Amino acid sequence: QVQLVESGGGLVQAGGSLRLSCAASGRTFPRFAAGWFRQAPGKDREFVAGITWNVGTTYHADSVKGRFTISRDNAKNTLYLQMNSLKAEDTAVYYCAQQSRSRGSLPRAISEFDSWGQGTQVTVSS
C-alpha cells in the first residue's frame, strides 16, 4: 500500500500563487503515473494535471493550462502542483493520485488511478 499526503493548500487572493506537494510513502513502486484532481462543493471530482513517472511527460486540463504546472521529484518521492494566476473558480479540495497498474498513456479518469491522498483545501478569494 502506498500512502499519499498532500500539503500546501490555504487561502490566497485571486492572482496569487500556491504550490501543493504530495509526499508518497510505503509501497511506492510500481508507479506509472501520478496526477492532481480537484473537487469543488457540489461538483464532481475533475482532472487537473498528470505526469508519467519515468519519462516525466506532463499534461494539463484546458482550464488550468498555462497557469498550473505539475512536476515530480523522484529522489523525494514527491509530486508538486505549482498554481499561478489563481482564480476564484480554482477553489476546491485538491487530491493527488497515483497509478500503480499501467492502463495506457496519459491517464485522466478517476478510475485509472489506484491510490489517493486525503486532500488539501485551496480557497481563492476574489
Image: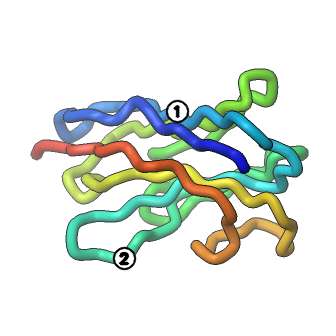
Q: 47 or 2: which is nearer to us?
A: 2
Q: Residue at x 29, y 55 (%)?
A: 92
Q: 107 or 7: which is nearer to us?
A: 7
Mark 2 → mark 1, Cα distance in angstroms: 22 Å
- Give the class, few, some or many, for how many residues have Cα within 10 Å of label 2's Cα (few <14, many ≥20): few
Point out residue 53 in the picture as x, y percentages from the top left corner: 81, 46
Q: 49 or 1: which is nearer to us?
A: 1
Considering the numbered disc 2 on the image, is that residue within a helix, a strand or a loop? Answer: loop
Query: Which residue does the numbered mark 1 point to in the structure image?
Result: 21
Query: Which residue does the numbered mark 2 point to in the structure image?
Result: 44
Vertical position of residue 59 compared to residue 3: above or below: below
Pointers 2 and 1 in contact (C-beta within 8 Å): no
- The quadrant where residue 124 appears: top left
- The quadrant where residue 116 appears: bottom right
Whichever of callouts 2 and 1 sits on the residue coming sooner in the sequence is 1
Vertical position of residue 74 compared to residue 105: above or below: above
Image check: 91 left or right of 36? Answer: left
Point out residue 5 in the picture as x, y percentages from the top left corner: 52, 38
Q: Residue at x 45, y 31 (%)?
A: 19
- The quadrant where residue 107 appears: bottom right
Vertical position of residue 68 compared to residue 65: above or below: above
Q: Residue at x 83, y 69 (%)?
A: 105
Considering the numbered disc 1 on the image, is that residue within a helix, a strand or a loop? Answer: strand
Image check: 8 left or right of 112? Answer: left
Point out residue 26 in the picture as x, y percentages from the top left corner: 73, 37
- The amino acid beneath tag 1 is Ser
- The amino acid beneath tag 2 is Asp
Q: Residue at x 30, y 45 (%)?
A: 121
- The circle on residue 34 is none
